Image: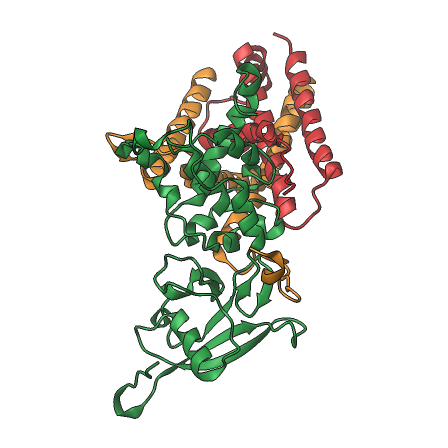
Amino acid sequence: MDKRVESENLVETIEIEVLRYRPEQDIGPITQRFSVPYSNTMSVLEALQQIKDEQDPTLSFRWSCRMAICGSCGMMINGVPKLACRTFLHEYYPARISVAPLKHFPIERDLVIAAAQYIRKLESIKPYIVPREPRSLEQGEYLQSPAQVERYKQFSTCINCMLCYAACPQFGLDSKFLGPGVLSLAPRYNADSRDGARDERMAMMHTDEGVWGCTAVGYCSEVCPKDVDPANAVNQNKMTSALDYFLRFVMPGRTT
Amino acid sequence: MSEQRMSAQRPYIRSTDGWWRDNPYYVRYMLREFSSLLVYAYGLVLLVGLVRLSQGEAAYDQWLEALRNPWALAFHGVMLLVLLYHTWSWFEIMPKTLPAIRLGGKRLSDGAINVIGLAAALVCCAALYGVALWLAR
Amino acid sequence: MARTLKRSNAPIFWLLFGAGGLIAALIGPMLVYLSGIGGPLGIGVPEGMMSYPRMLAFSQHWAGKLFLFVVTTLILWHAALRIYHTLHDLGFHTGKVLTSSLYGLTLIFTLIAAYALLSVSF
């Protein structure tokens, strides 16, 4: 990785303070400071990569695409959930930047958090099209009008980065809460004209771990890098769930 | 995805104590929620008024006189601010609770909903004032 | 994967919360002014607006009863739900005892309001 050298051989540097945790040697997390050569095009991810390549190869963190689409590099940057590849040193320079693993998740090592529970929750709402009716190849592809796509498009841009979970205090207080991300992906499929599994997904959402665990803090939508607006997705479904709660007796055969 | 391979030796779980203190966004949220204690107190003031009313003129007049006490006036002054804040924060969060409303092809923006809500509150407050004036003419 | 599918009863309280919150948002400020500042002090309101004869007449009419009952009780229910969540957010254990005390108390207040308004007669 080439060092970006400013005029007269002076290398401007910026301090990165990382929350480290090595279970085999640390009792709990500790902070460690690194000095990284600064350039005004570098992202926090690149700074971490510089540290790992040139200073401390044991620094552990997740990353992949470097362009805010894979959702791997979510972390707390100065206490705010952000994607490291999309957060730039120049936004903070010359002040020190603190980097910590995503809040509300157990830390596995350094900046790597345990995501297995999130994956399980995601699986539980069937994040795929369950065909409304059987369809053969001969029938050809599904046709959707722009209006039909509009109904779910916003929620489909989720990249599973989990920043909203780091933002959500209700998830922080109770990890059984399905959370903003999963509760936004459920409507993505429910609102899709091709899908027929709405009833099964709504059964998950009608619970206290579903939409009713949300208290409309709204911070999840503030931090979402893809403008999914999970606060909107979840709170819209409170009305849906409430109506269903009362109407299920009046109209048998509706969602249970 | 094997749970064994993904799990750490000793995952570290961080405390959530004082979670709302460091972030201005959370502080505003807690202020909004804390205001509920005062709102409940105001509801009780109204309730006591109803009970006093049902107990006859002497009891009611005592309650009315108590409202003229400086402490009571100060409380209501604070309540006025709290309820103005409630009105503001209610319509601030309202766009999140509504499905997309489309007018002429374009989606109604969050800002538009804020403004419409606040305008509605202004109209309703004016209407309440008008009705009070008319009833007491 | 065993996940509880117990439907929540939150909708009942949420609708009460929403109705109370909306009413408070639409008329709350003016209500506080009339009932707690302008009314008792006679500022910006007609003479004797909050006097016993006037308030009695208002509460004897069915519309007056409805207004007073709805406004008072929904404000209490709205605030009750918010208090519940605030306590939870602060880390209190919001178990059955706390929940039933809070909502039970609010229910008692609701009944008191109804009784007071009905005993004022028509």
Whether residue B84 appears in this view of the structure is no
Query: Residue farthest to the front?
Result: A138
Q: How is the image coloured?
A: by chain
| Residue nearest the viewer, comparing B14 with B113 | B14
In the rendered picture, chain A carries what hue? green
As drawn, A149 above or below B134: below
Q: Quadrant of the C terminus of chain A?
A: top right
**Residue furthest right as drawn:** C97
Vertical arrangement, residue A163 with respect to residue B68, above or below: below
Chain C rendered in what hue?
red
Q: Quadrant of the N terminus of chain A?
A: bottom left
* Chain letter for the part of the structure drawn in orange: B
Residue A76, position in %: x, y? 49, 63
Observer-nearest of A102 and A2? A2
Occupied quadrant, residue B73: top right
Q: Is residue A161 above or below residue B129?
A: below
Which residue shows up at 69% across the image and 42% down it? C94
Percent position (x, y) of residue B135?
47, 16
Quarter of the rendering containing residue C57 = top right
Residue at left offset 52%, top offset 13%: C63
Q: Residue furthest bottom?
A: A8
Q: Position of residue A240 (x, y in %)?
A: 48, 29
Count the labels in the image.
0
- The percent position of residue B37, horizontal first and vertical second, equals 61, 41
Q: Residue at x 42, y 57 (%)?
A: A71
* Of the pair B74 and A58, the residue shown nearer to us: A58
Camera-side residue of C51 and A248: A248
Q: Do we see residue A69 in this rendering? A: yes
- Residue lying furthest top: C122
